[in-house]
Every structure is written in structure tokens, then in C-alpha cells.
Image (cartoon, rainbow, N blue to C red):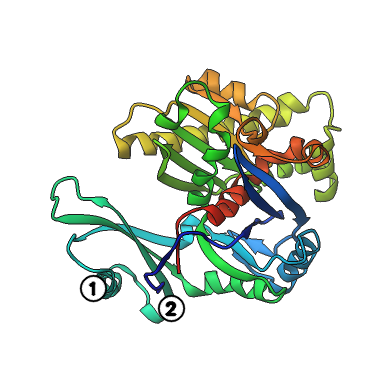
Amino acid sequence: MLSKLWKRQAPQMVGIDVGSHEIKAILLSKTADGYKIVSHATVPVKKGAVTDHEIRDNDAITESLRQVKRSLPKGIKFASVAVSGSAVMTKVIYMDATLSEEEMEAQIDIEADNLIPYSLDEVSIDFETLSVNSTDPTKVDVLLSACRTENIDARVDALDAINIETKVVDIEGYALGRSFEMVAAQLPGEAKNKVVALVDIGANITTFAVVENGETSFIREQAFGGEQFTQSILSFYGMSHEQAEKAKIEGDLPRNYMFEVLSPFQTQLLQQIKRTLQIYCTSSGKDKVDHIVLCGGTSKLEGMANLLTNELGVHTIIADPFQGCLHADDGVKKRLQPDISKYMVACGLALRSYSQWRT
């Protein structure tokens, strides 16, 4: 459990997003009008090394992280990483507002023992005081989070192997929600006061984060992503996996591919997004979200943003932090511009360097 001393400034951390297809890392510095990229890296991951967001091949991930480290400044010591939201159990509990941090921690252990279906020796627990309870002002809402320690240790151990200390283990959905700060200026009007759904379409998992008034209020994951698109190309045109990936990236596909492969995949993706937004609206009492921001490696599929705008009636854009508050030297910006939307989770993790810090 974390101790209860608050520092004013967190250490500078590189945000490292460990995916099933590649590892993305970004290091940010704070500027007067936003953030600037100090360093970045994208390194492929051996197929099967990460499955369902769990590290299955520690050696392969460590080797990929070594390649990431070579792209970082030599003095970098700390990192922020994330575990899948599906690996984390969360519950909002109510506690007496007069409890001290130490008393609250003791009470949390009792609550956790009732909530978690594992031995407490097998889990890592943390909590955060949210706000005064809306129905009883003598109570405070407290977010209790628990994750199997082995899921955390796999990431911590891999970074330890390359001599980088893990300072923060976040939840991917919340890291995605935090990255909204980077793209808020892309949206019209007072977007910070609106309800915005960020949708990160990865290789195997699509992660959702709904941000209301600047705070992440809902996260969810769906087991669907760009790998399904690759598999369709592979099976439809008799290609190997490597050929299908290359053809997808370079656009070197038969003329009928839009009708045969792209359109059916987009329809499936639309249904996944629509279903998750319905779950959010049902749980929140909202009629709809105000904006959708697409990100991740599959977000830039031709016509995807327009399809969502037309089918869902919700203004949809592709994330471009460079149109928000992210800056970079000209060479870096030119190199990263086509792929910057896939760095959103990594950016959200890197932003932990500039948030309130507890140690």
C-alpha cells in the first residue's frame, strides 16, 4: 500500500504502453502552452508475447524494452506503465469523512477482503478519495482498486531487467482518458465541459474511456481490433500474416478490397462502438456523448470517422495531439504525424509526471 505523503512534483517518467503488436514509449516535457516530445520509440513485439494484455514471454518483452531504452535519453530512470482494465477490480465504497488516511487504509483492508475473490496476499490494492458522497455529506466516496500482483510484477520485472524503475502502474482506460488533455483543443467550443468518448482501437483490444468535464467517468474494453482486419485480408487473399500486415499498412490491396474486406470490418467495429456507448448511456442516464475521438493503430482506416459521424449522429475525429497541446521539433513532428494517434495511452501515462503525486 502506498504511504500517504503527497509530493508537489512527480519524477519525470517515460510512458510505456505495452501492446500485443508493439511497445510505444514517449517522454514529455512541460511547456508554457502544453507539452513537448523529448523522446519516443515504437518497437515491434514478438507475436504471442502479449496475449489478452498479459505478458506470456518475459524474455521477448525484455528484449523489446531494451530496444526502447536505446531511443531514450541515457539519464532516464523512471517509467509509468498500465495494466488492462479487465485485470483490475474496482468498486466505489463509502467511508466516514472524518477518518484519517491511516484509519482509512485499515478500513480498506477489511473492505478489500470482502470484495476480492482471491487471497489478499495475491493482489495489489490502492485507493483514492473521490468526493463527498452526494446523498450523505458525512461520508466520502472512495475508489478501491485491486489487481492480481502477478500482472503488475510482469511489467515491473521486465523494466527492472533494463534498469528502469516503475514508479506508476496505471489502468489503460484511465491513461487513455487522461490523454484527452492533449486533444481537447481539436474539438469545437468548450469541449472540456462536454462528454467525450475516446476509443483506442488496438491490435486485439479496443479500449473506451468516457471523459465528462475533464474527468474519466467510464472505461471498458472489447476484445476486437485491427488483428481481425488483418486476418480477413489474410484469409480472403491467401496471404501470409506478414504479407497481410504489409499490404494493410501500404494499401497494396486488390481493387475490390473496400467492398470485400474493409466495409464488413468497419461495420463490425461500428457495432462494437455502438454497443459500448449504449452501455455507457444506460449506466449514466445520458442520451448520447457529445464527441468521439478515435485513436490507436486502426483508427485511421479510410472513412471510419465519417461512418461514425453519419451512423451514430455524433461528431467524430481522429486524435491528433499536434493540433492540441503537443509540440515537437520539426523533424520529430514530421516523422510522427502519420502515427501520433496510436501514442495516446503512452501520452496519458507520460502525463503522470505532471500530476499530483503520492509516495
Residue where numbered disc 2 is placed: 122
Q: Position of residue 109 (x, y in %)?
A: 29, 74
Determine whether, in the image, residue 83 is placed left or right of residue 23.
left
Residue 65 image position (x, y, % from top left) = 73, 65
Q: Secondary structure at mark 1?
A: helix
**Residue at (17, 56) in percent of width and height:** 139
Q: Is residue 298 visible?
A: no
Going by the numbered disc 2, the residue's amino acid type is Glu
**Tag 2 secondary structure:** helix
Mark before the other along the chain sequence, 1 or 2 = 1
Quadrant in which the N terminus is drawn: bottom left
- Residue 144 in the figure: left or right of residue 107: right
Decide if residue 41 is in sight here.
Answer: yes
Q: What crowding class fits label 1: few (fewer than 14 Cα within 10 Å), some (14-19), or many (20 or more)?
A: few
**At x 86% / y 33%, what residue is drawn?**
252
Residue contact between numbered discs 1 and 2, judged by CB atoms under 8 Å: no
